[in-house]
Each structure stands twice: as C-alpha cells, then as structure tokens.
Amino acid sequence: MISVGEDLPHPVPPQAFMMWKENWVFPGVDPERRIAVLFHVSLRPTQGEGIFTAKFTVDGWEHRWVGREPIPQQLAGFVPVQGGKLRFDVEAPMEQFRLRYTSDELDADITFTARFAPWDFDEGVKAPGPSRMGELGRTVFPFHHYEQSLTMSGTITAHDGPHAGTTFEVAGFGNRDHSWGFRDDHSFIEHHWLNANFPDNYVQGTVMHETSYPHPKFGGWVSVEGSNTGVVHVDRSGAYWLEPNTPFPDLVKDVTYRLRLADGATRTITAHLAEPYARLFLNFRSKDRAKAYQDQQIMCDFTDDDTGASGVGVLEIGKRLVGPGVADLI
C-alpha cells in the first residue's frame, strides 16, 4: 500500500552496489491543440547523476532536451527534484505535481492533477511460481512501481521555430509513473505499457517479460470514480511486431489489446498509431553494441471497442535485440 510520502525521493539503501534508479515519468496530450509533452526524471545515485528529459511536440514541431546533471548519492531530502533546465515539485502528494522547464527555445509550466486514485502494482496479480528476485519479481515490474491518471494544464511558450512568440494554454490528459529500486534495463525482453484516458475512466494494461521470471507477466488496472480494479491478463496477440530479435516494422497500423479484470469484466482497447500526437524513441544500447532495447512511446488516440468511446494517451512498447552489432540496427 502506497502512502503520501512515497511521492518524494526514497532513501538509497547502503547495500546499493548495483544500479539503483528512481524514476518519474509524466506524459500528457492536449488533443485539441495537438500538443504532446513528456517529462522524465531518472535519478541514478550509485552513478552520481540524474538524467533529466523534457520533450514537446506542438502541432508537428518538436523540441527535445536531455541533460545529465550531478545529484546527491543519498536521495532522501532531494526536494525539489531539479537538474539543469527542469524542475519537478510535488505540490500536493497524490494530488498535484508541477513541472517547469526553461530554455532559450521554449518555456513550459505544466501542472498535472489527479483524476483518480493511484495504483500500486504490488497490489496487482502475482505471477505463479517463483522468481529469482523473490516476491517482488512476481509482480509485473520487478521493482517498486505505481501510477496514476491525471489531467494536464499550463502554458508552453515557444521562442523558436514556426510558433516563436506564441504562448499556448494547454489542457488535456496525462498520467504519471513513479518507480524505484535496483534495476537492470538490459534484463528486459519485451514490454507493452498501455495508458488510455477516456471521459469517465482510465485503462492501464501492462505486459512485461524480463529475465527474473520465465514468462511474460501481466498487470494494470481500470480507474473509475471511487475505485480501481486490477487487470489480471492482457492479450497482446494483435501486436504485429513480436517476432524475436528483429527490429520494429513501421508502426502505422492500429493495434488492439484485450484486458481481463479481477472482477471478470473485459475491456477491448484499440490504439491508433498512424497519426500520433508524438512518437518518441527511448532506445538504449550496451557499450559493446551487442545488446539493444528498442523502445517507442507513441502518444495517440484510443478507442474503447466495447462502448465506442474515444480517448487519448500513450502506448509504449519495447523489445530486446541481441547479436554482434545489433545496436546499429536501431
């Protein structure tokens, strides 16, 4: 069970000899103005640095910034979370979060506000049988992790490009993702991370296959006013990029996921990938370039196939590639 204190940076255990990460991710979409934003903070105290990311797409025009900034080795008390051009404030735990970005090309002041209660993946379905990481490895993500549906509001002012001198009043939907713990991203084999905001509900479905457990694991939840219901299975058979060890094809066709909930209900959600609000590439590679993880985050429209309702959000998908020089393929 998560508490309000979980929104802040966590103490780093003294035995943290391998990679320890604490991440916050805030994607958001304003469909009326065709604006997409992504803020990502990845604190890596065992390496003494944080990676701070701000990415914006305004009606097709893109602005990207990634900064590597020094951070303390002990994260407790690192408030506000700030590095380079980006500042993150928890203004009201579990309720309101503010991201401010300042640069010569673009300024942004965006507030994310809770739509529904957060969901702790540790409270979701556990995969059957053992994981080499113990009980935590039986959850869909093998580290502490929770998420929440949000609304998004604020301003973006462009100082460069086709919209120079224009301030946009932003209004839309988003979500937040907060995770912390020991982490080896090269242990990932495949994942699907579906986040769809509909007018009166939010649908989240996750598939994660990683090396601590022999099979894909499932998780997620559906939020409505006053309650969350866990997802116990995600049918990803409609994904057309699952052939092992081959790069993604062009991701321009729709893809449909079928989710089964803990109460027996089902949800069928289609992501429309052909004309996204933004398409972000989050690939990473090993130093010897013999391992790579291809990762795309696609901010797009969704349809609830059961009701016909339209929504917006983000679908992130990833797959592992292994072999000499494979990193050069992506």
Image (cartoon, rainbow, N blue to C red):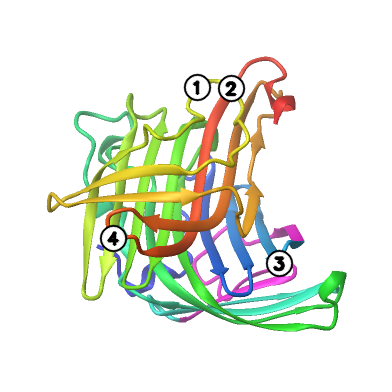
Within-10-Å neighbours for mark 3: few <14, some 14–19, many 20+: some
Secondary structure of the residue carrying numbered label 3? loop
Measured along the vertical axis of the image, is residue 60 above or below residue 192? below
Q: 308 or 25: nearer the eye?
A: 308
Magenta range: 63-91
Chain-order first, disc 2 or disc 3: 3
Mark number, residue 243: 1
Q: Provide the residue designation for mark 3.
A: 59
Give the mark nearest the N terminus, 2 or 4.
2
Gap in angstroms between the C-alphas marked 1 and 4? 31 Å
Q: Indicate whether 147 appears above or below 218.
A: below
Dot 2: what SS? loop
Mark 1–mark 2 CB contact (< 8 Å): yes
Callout 4 amino acid: Thr
The answer to whether residue 233 is seen in the rendering is: yes
Front in this rendered view, residue 13 or 131: 131
Q: Tell me the mark number nearer the camera, choosing from 2 and 4.
A: 4
